[in-house]
Every structure is written in structure tokens, then in C-alpha cells.
Image: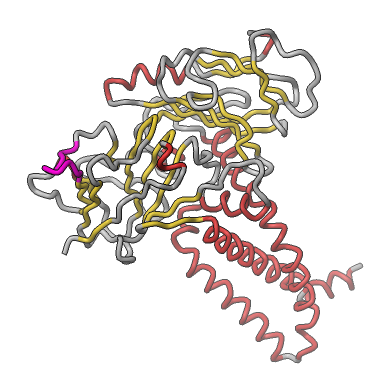
């Protein structure tokens, strides 16, 4: 018995278990990330996963959903889009200024509400000077003369346009757009969230 | 902890792999025989472990919610088993760090609880929401699937009582109640109640508090 234990401790079996388990974990993460990519649709830099939360999902999709959006609503209850890149594919950063323009009548169609939230890369809201971490259908947004709505994403207040300002944190950030009880146009994929444009 | 792993996952992984490489190199330098048991065990654990991690991942994440609910709660202390807690405030950047509430939206009040139907059914009671958006989501911890919804989309906004049963339950559903069969005795419950604005908050909170779990003998 003692001889066996000595062999176990010196032969590398324990190290093998630790190394194998770590590789298994990393492989699982890589596989799940790959599956997340296959179930994610990205349009104009906005990514959405429509498959999550359904009982009929297979093992891989379940795992990918649990990793990307744990315990998330089914899509017809709430549509979620996330963006970490602007319309040209550059990562969103607090060092830049951006505008998100919804053409007239093109705010996300819904039967409950929509909201746009800025978070750090992990998904937590970040403190900011005006204590505003989201803009939503209750915000009093100023329309342009053609009925379109510009939302300004930047660290410093855009002078004269503070009502449409969503302050961004220093460094990289993430946006999440929600539409609860998404309208038909979202469910049949006709609706597209406009791209986030960097202000030059 | 989770936050640190998410933020520094890549450098942490690189350091761990470097340590492994060093361990293996030490053995190889003592002779190739020294590395054989390690390699065999590592490959076996790797091949069996990867599918196991993938299979168990939904359970691991939903059990994270279980731990968060039963140990930490949503700001009002631990939430007892088979009860629902309504958070009095919406998500905001001032929500406690690590809290589930720092990740949501400020248009919703969140309600959460963990079900255990082993000892018998429970009744979910919802008030008349008068057209207000709300939902109660039931998630199966074994596969992270939402097996049932109560709410504006699924059942409408009138007051109602829903009879929640576990997989082994046999009996009669009380008159006037809709049965919700949980595929497992355990289930995660997440409620969401719409908040129009600051002045609507007391009304919304009052309604969120009336989303309750009641044992049948007290109903």
C-alpha cells in the first residue's frame, strides 16, 4: 500500500490528472466558444443568439448558451444584442466617441420596452458622472429634423446633446441592447440594429 | 473571483501552461520513462474530461445562481428555499459589486428564488398586473432550459395561481389552477417586473412583492 502511494506520488500520475483535467477544461471552453460562434448572428457589429433557453437544444448548444448567456430568456421573451465593436470592426473604447443613429421609426420594435446599457467587458455597469448607465424608451431623447435619433456614446458630455448621451467608461466597453417582447420584425429577422459609428 | 477569472483568464492560462511545461520538462530531463505514466493519465483524463465539462456546464452555471440566491440573495440577505425575493431597486452601477443586479437593466425589478419540490407541490401566486409587462421564468438546472413561463406573453397579466409539481408527484390539481410540471425537483425561478420610471417604482415593487410561492396547505 505504502509502496503504491509512493509510486503514485512519484510516477507523475497526480500531475497527469491535474494536467489532463486542465486540458479538458480548456478544450471544453474552446469547443463551447466555437459553438457560440456558430449560433451567434452578427449584423452591423451587433451579436444575438436566438437559440438559447429552449428545452429541445442539444448538449453543445445548451453548454454554449450557459457559457455565453447563463439562464437567459428565450428569444421571444427578450431579444438581446451585444456589441464590443463598432460598425467598422474596431473594438469599442472609451478613448473614442461614437454615435448610434436609429433612422426614423427604427427603434427596436417591442411590446414591452427596449433599453441600451453600457457595461465593462465582463458585463457590469460602471459608475459615471451623471449616474446614467442606460438609455431606454422612457428617456426623453431629442429627435433630428428627419425623425432619426442619435445616441452619443462617449466619456465627455456632448455639449447641447446631453439628453441623448450615454456616458462610456475608460477603456474597452460593451453595449447591450434589449427588446423585451420583441416585435415581429425582430423575430423574423427583418429588423437590423444600426451600426455604431465612430465620430472622426 | 469570477470577475478576476473573466478579466485575466488568458494570462492565468498562459502561466498555468508554462508551469505544466516546466514539470514535464523536469521529468523528461531525468529520462523519457519518467514521463510515460503522466502522459497516459493526462490523455485519459483529457479525453474523458472534455465532454464531461461540456455536458455539466449548464448545471454548473445554474448552480452558480443557486448558490448566489441561497447564500447571498439580491441585496436582502439569503433567499430561503421555496420563497421568492423581490429586489426593491432596479439594476444600477451602484448595485453591490459581484451582485447579479449589477448586470441587468434599470427597466426591470428582479425577483428570484430556488425551488425544491421534493416535499410536495407549491403554488405560484401572481397579482393582477393590469397590462404591465412581467414574466416569471422557470429554469431546469440540469440543462439550463426554460421549461415554463408565467407572464404577459405566456399567460397574460391577470391574477392567477399556478400549481408547481415535481417529476414524482401524482395527484389532482386544485380547481382553478394551471399545472406547471418541473422536470426536476429543483428549479431556478427568475421574475421580472417592468418599471416605467422613478415614480412608478413603488407600484412596480408592490406588484413584484406579490409574486409569491405558497405551500398548498396554506393557500
> Which residue is at a point 51% across and 19% down the rendered structure image?
B211
Q: Position of residue A56 (x, y in %)?
A: 66, 43
Left or right of A13, for residue B133: left
* Labels in figure, total: 0
Q: Nearer the viewer, residue A102 or B117?
A: A102
Quarter of the rendering containing residue A149: top left
> Which residue is at a point 89% across and 69% down the rendered structure image?
A2
Quarter of the rendering containing residue A147: top left
- Residue positioned most to the left: A160
Decide: is B135 above or below A17.
above
Range of residues picked out in magenta: A141-149
Q: Nearer the viewer, residue A176 or B92?
A: A176
Q: Which image quadrant: the C terminus of chain B?
A: top right
Left or right of A122, for residue B120: right
> Which residue is at a point 45% across and 44% down the rendered structure image?
B98
Q: Nearer the viewer, residue B167 or A151?
A: A151
Q: Main secondary structure of the magenta part?
A: loop
> Which residue is at a point 65% across and 55% down the rendered structure image?
A60
Amino acid at each position: 500500500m505504502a509502496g503504491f502511494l509512493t509510486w503514485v506520488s512519484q510516477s507523475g500520475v497526480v500531475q497527469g490528472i491535474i494536467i489532463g483535467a486542465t486540458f479538458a477544461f480548456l478544450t471544453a471552453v474552446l469547443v463551447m466558444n466555437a459553438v457560440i460562434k456558430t449560433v451567434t448572428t452578427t449584423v452591423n457589429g451587433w451579436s444575438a443568439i436566438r437559440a438559447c433557453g429552449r428545452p429541445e437544444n442539444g448538449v453543445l448548444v445548451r453548454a454554449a448558451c450557459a457559457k455565453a448567456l447563463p439562464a437567459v430568456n428565450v428569444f421571444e421573451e427578450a431579444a438581446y444584442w451585444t456589441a464590443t465593436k463598432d460598425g467598422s470592426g474596431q473594438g469599442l473604447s472609451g478613448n473614442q466617441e461614437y454615435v448610434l443613429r436609429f433612422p426614423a421609426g427604427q427603434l427596436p420594435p417591442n411590446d414591452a420596452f427596449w433599453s441600451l446599457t453600457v457595461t465593462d467587458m465582463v458585463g457590469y455597469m460602471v459608475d459615471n458622472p451623471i449616474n446614467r448607465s442606460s438609455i431606454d424608451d422612457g428617456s426623453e431623447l431629442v429627435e433630428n429634423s428627419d425623425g432619426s435619433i442619435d445616441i452619443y456614446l462617449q466619456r465627455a458630455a456632448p455639449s447641447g446633446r446631453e439628453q441623448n448621451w450615454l456616458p462610456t467608461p475608460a477603456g474597452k466597453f460593451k453595449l447591450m441592447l434589449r427588446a423585451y417582447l420583441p416585435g415581429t420584425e425582430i423575430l423574423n429577422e427583418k429588423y437590423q440594429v444600426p451600426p455604431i459609428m465612430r465620430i472622426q | 473571483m469570477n470577475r478576476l477569472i473573466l478579466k485575466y483568464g488568458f494570462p492565468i492560462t498562459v502561466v498555468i501552461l508554462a508551469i505544466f511545461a516546466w514539470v514535464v520538462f523536469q521529468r523528461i530531463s531525468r529520462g523519457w520513462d519518467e514521463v510515460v505514466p503522466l502522459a497516459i493519465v493526462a490523455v485519459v483524463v483529457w479525453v474523458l474530461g472534455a465532454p464531461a465539462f461540456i455536458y455539466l456546464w449548464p448545471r454548473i452555471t445554474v448552480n452558480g445562481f443557486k448558490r448566489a440566491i441561497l447564500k447571498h440573495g439580491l441585496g436582502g440577505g439569503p433567499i430561503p428555499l421555496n420563497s421568492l425575493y423581490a429586489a426593491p431597486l432596479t439594476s444600477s452601477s451602484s448595485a453591490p459589486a459581484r451582485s447579479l443586479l449589477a448586470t441587468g437593466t434599470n427597466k426591470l425589478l428582479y425577483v428570484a428564488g430556488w425551488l425544491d419540490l421534493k416535499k410536495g407541490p407549491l403554488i405560484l401566486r401572481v397579482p393582477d398586473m393590469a397590462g404591465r409587462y412581467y414574466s416569471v421564468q422557470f429554469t431546469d438546472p440540469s440543462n439550463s432550459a426554460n421549461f415554463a413561463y408565467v407572464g404577459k406573453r405566456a399567460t397574460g397579466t391577470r391574477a392567477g395561481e399556478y400549481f408547481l409539481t415535481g417529476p414524482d408527484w401524482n395527484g389532482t390539481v386544485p380547481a382553478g389552477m394551471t399545472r406547471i410540471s418541473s422536470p426536476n425537483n429543483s428549479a431556478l425561478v427568475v421574475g421580472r417586473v417592468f418599471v416605467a420610471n422613478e415614480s412608478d417604482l413603488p407600484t412596480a415593487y408592490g406588484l413584484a412583492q406579490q409574486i409569491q410561492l405558497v405551500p398548498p396547505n396554506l393557500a
